Amino acid sequence: MPEFQEKCRVSAIEQLASDVFRLTVHAPLIAGAAHPGQFVMVRVVDGFDPLLRRPFSIHQQFAGGSLKLLFKVIGQGTHILSGLAAGDTISLLGPLGRGFDLACREPVCLIGGGMGIAPLAFLAKRLALSGRDSSLDFVLLGARDGDEVSSLADDFSQLGYTVVPATDDGSLGHHGFIPELLDDVLPAVSRVYSCGPYPMMRTVVAKCQKADVVCQVSLETHMACGLGACLGCTVQGNSGQYVHVCKQGPVFYSGEVAWTE
Amino acid sequence: MDRIIPDNECDLRVNIGRLRLRNPVMTASGTFGYAREFSNLVNLHRLGGIVVKGISLEARPGNPPPRVVETACGMLNAIGLENVGVERFITEKVPFLRNLDCPVVVNILGDSVEEYQQIAHRLNEVDGISALEVNISCPNVKKGGVAFGTVPEMAARVTAAVRKATSLPVIIKLSPNVTDIVQMARAVEEAGADCVSLVNTLIGMAIDPQTRRPKLANVIGGLSGPAIKPVALRMVWQVASNVSIPVIGIGGITTASDALEFLLAGATAIQVGTANFYEPRAAEQIIAGLKNYLHEQKELSICDIIGTVQTG
């Protein structure tokens, strides 16, 4: 699997909500090799504080060599990233990790919560371009409020997907949580792709298991390198062993990892 | 971009006892995996040496997560010495390492003197290994869990046992979590070490005020990165001034300037550690930077600057 370190020019930064940003960078080598579900490690500053690169899943990829990254301002790293402007340069490593398995001809459901929506946009585009009937697929997107999710939902709609939003405050779509919508959708699909907060994914995984629907999840953890060297990004595997999110993931079949309260 | 200085204009070769390095820049154990992890991003053949992830007799699963946390200009880790064990290391990792045009040093660890001795003996028969680096920061399970590396007599016993079990050069990696690092270095020198490398991580801690819980599941962990560089440099200088075996400097080295500080303080070689995580090409950049320095200073060999800090 090819991996590259690229000094990338920022071509745009969009503010999608008060604390949600989308960064477009020119990274032709990484973009050319990227598969949906893979991630990049971003060096936020040239100096030593913050020290470590930040992992971001690839939100969108374009044939012209651009990548989009989606993030919410949470800490020091994302705060600095939100202040980037077109023309700035940042260092990216990627594409890293194991992405989604796309080999499914039957209808599928994409379930994203919050910034977990990020990798699903790339996945949706790749699936839509594979010649399937996207109108039979479902996209369920959960967010805090309508501002956070509306423009992201448009990206999926434009690809021909049926998009169902759910918001914590009821300002757009279903008032409540995504898993509440799942019972109606699962009988119509044979595979679920999910990324989002751990409690959301745990519920999604439990419902998929009950309905005998294959489920792939993209996990997020702290990691120092993204390359399989630091061994810091551990989660509990299904049979007591540890698995590493950066190499064995970030996308796992739901049965490969342990789901705990 | 600096001009690339041809190799014949400056000599970066150094010797660690019998171990000959084409340049003094190595990668530190635990920060470079088994080298293959970096093969897409780094020209491994250019490195002075590679120290692979610490190996124990049996495979170890490591600690529960979270295992890493970022701190100001550094990071804490409590990986828990996760590794595949010596037999899988030999069958799965050594074939790749053997084909590298660069010396491979295997870092070893154990819970008892006997374990260190057994693993050293096992690796002695394996082709493709240039030296052993002994991690003595592990707790001695048989002696109440006190780290080998904090008691001079225990460090000396491990050193002597490994020395006896192998014909390879033996590097002892010293813990900085001691009152007198020179005493430790002298103890392992007398016990037969060919070289000392220092420092391992400094024990630290971080707490989340919101949850009132430690940020690491293991509660405490090892601090590394630029934050520890001044402490490491001081210890390297003290040890290099007081032992006659070569010293390898480790601790927060990211740039050629950092590396030069350690060489001037008396280190014969250096290891790049945490920097591999955030700048995988750090070691290669340091090699290029050292060449430039020699050129600018009109020095012919890197050996001519080792230990030349003017403290008087």
Image (spheres, helix red, strand yellow):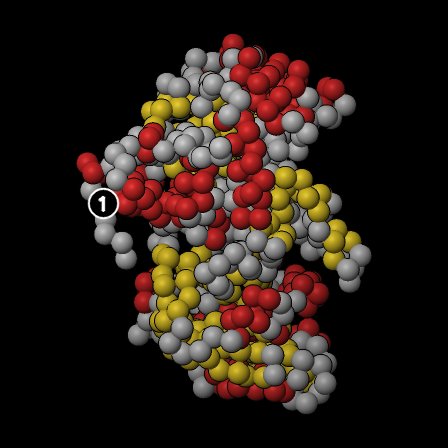
Which quarter shows the N terminus of chain B? bottom left
Residue B117, by quadrant, is top right
Q: Residue at x 57, y 78 (%)?
A: A20
Residue B182, by quadrant, is top right
The foreground one among B166 and B186 is B186
| Residue reaching furthest to the top | B164
Is residue B101 depicted above or below B243 in this figure?
below
The foreground one among B157 and A245 is B157
Is residue B135 depicted above or below B41 in this figure?
above
Q: Residue at x 20, y 42 (%)?
A: B6
Q: Can residue B156 be spotted in the picture?
A: yes
- How far across and down, in percent of the image, does residue A62 sit? 36, 74
- How far across and down, in percent of the image, does residue A135 sit? 48, 83
Q: Residue at x 66, y 23 (%)?
A: B148
- How far across and down, in percent of the image, does residue B179 sit? 68, 29
| Residue reaching furthest to the front | B312
Please report, as a chain letter, where disc 1 is located. B
Is residue B143 depicted above or below A24 in this figure?
above
Left or right for B176, reference A44: right
Residue A184, by quadrant, is bottom right
The foreground one among B82 and A216 is B82
Q: Which residue is mark 1?
A: B5
Q: How many dots with numbers?
A: 1
Q: Residue at x 55, y 12 (%)?
A: B190
The foreground one among A220 and B167 is B167
Q: For the residue marked with disc 1, what is the amino acid?
A: Ile
| Residue reaching furthest to the bottom | A171
Q: Can residue B173 be spotted in the picture?
A: no
Mark 1: few, some, or many residues within 10 Å (few <14, many ≥20)? some
